[in-house]
Image: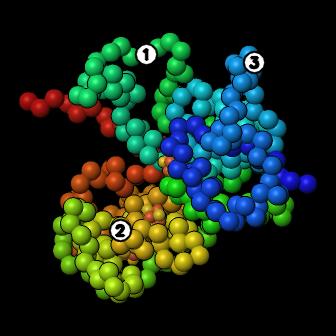
Amino acid sequence: MALKVVEEWVNACAGCEISILNMGDALIDLFPQLDFVHIPMLMDHKHYGQLGEKDVMDIPEADVGIITGAVRNEEHKHVAEEMRKKCKTIIALGSCATHGGIPAQANMFQKQDILEEIYGNSKTTTPSDIPSQNVPPWLDRVYAVDEVIKVDILVPGCPPHPVCIQDVIKDLLEGKTEWKLPERSVCDTCPTIREKKAIAGVVKRCFENLAFNPEEGPDKMRCINEQGFFCMGPVTLAGCAGRTGVPRCIAARMPCRGCFGPIRKGANPMVDMMGAMTSIGLDAKTLADRRAMLNRFIGAHNMLRPLPARPPRR
Ligand code: SF4
Ligand code: SF4
Ligand code: SF4
């Protein structure tokens, strides 16, 4: 019998859904064994009936529930709770769902300050009142899905790699309801040349190109951190290489931005990354926008919080 699947997006950008589609032929091969009964990205299925005629949320029962996106408002929370009630196995797909992702960068600021900035102070829009009717109220901060409901399988990545999604689905079809990437870093899977010493002490910004020869593979390129740029490979979970063996950004000659999140639960990539930079002679204090950069995808789970207000200068 086919595996019944429902999919929902909350505070998401649709990149994770594109990743499902990016399985390509593999998805077509899996289709006969999958029965997608609700997936807003692909099917016109409303929460309260097609004409809004129902007064309870209408998410069908399923074997597997996939949730993408972070939990920002009361409606997102309600969707996640309904998914948990209706689905035997819940997958949090993508780093917004597993770690808060980009939406959780908002956790650096007080909720009221963000609303005032958007509706009152934005230079690109006309100032207006903060909407309070017919919109779901925000929660106090942005949450990862597992802070709101029990999650069975976490698939990180922004977006997650189609090969990871494919592996999870294959495991589920074989009755395995546990899946986890091995605990190793992006550096562990990176072929670049390392000499354990940065060529400069100050962190360069990616306004200039890395040094590499486009005719040669990344195995002939010097490690990006050692070139003096900021690469989160040392503290980021490996898994984006798919079947190619080379991490996705490194293959594109770009630094890792940390999108798969920390290597293990409870790690503190901010502290670990500053240690990794120091060990090769890169001054972590010269990294622009340090708190945001070091927590770019992982601001839920209280990793990012508003800083206490500074006392006025005398
Ligand atoms: S994890 Fe990335 S791709 Fe997926 S919803 Fe969030 S921002 Fe979009
Ligand atoms: S820091 Fe970046 S470029 Fe250097 S080895 Fe790690 S992943 Fe590769
Ligand atoms: S190299 Fe880093 S940022 Fe790029 S896809 Fe892999 S984990 Fe994500």
Percent across and percent down for residue 236 are 47, 65
Q: Quadrant of residue 216?
A: bottom left
Neighbor class of circle 2 (other Cα within 10 Å; few <14, some 14-19, many 20+) is some
Residue 146 vs residue 220, the one in the foreground: 220
Q: Quadrant of the C terminus?
A: top left
List x then y, in percent, for residue 305. 40, 39
Real-space Cα separation, disc 2 to disc 3, in angstroms: 48 Å
CB at mark 2 closer than 8 A to ligand 3?
Answer: yes
Residue 301 in the image: x percent, y percent? 52, 44
**Which quarter of the image is occupied by the N terminus?**
bottom right
Q: Which mark is residue 254?
A: 2
Q: Position of residue 9 (x, y in %)?
A: 60, 40
Residue sitting at x 52%, y 19%: 135
Q: Residue at x 33, y 63 (%)?
A: 274
Disc 1: residue Cβ within 8 A of ligand 1's nearest atom: no
Q: Which residue is mark 1?
A: 131
Could one spot residue 81 in this view of the protein?
A: no
Q: Quadrant of ligand 2?
A: bottom left
Q: Is residue 189 visible?
A: yes
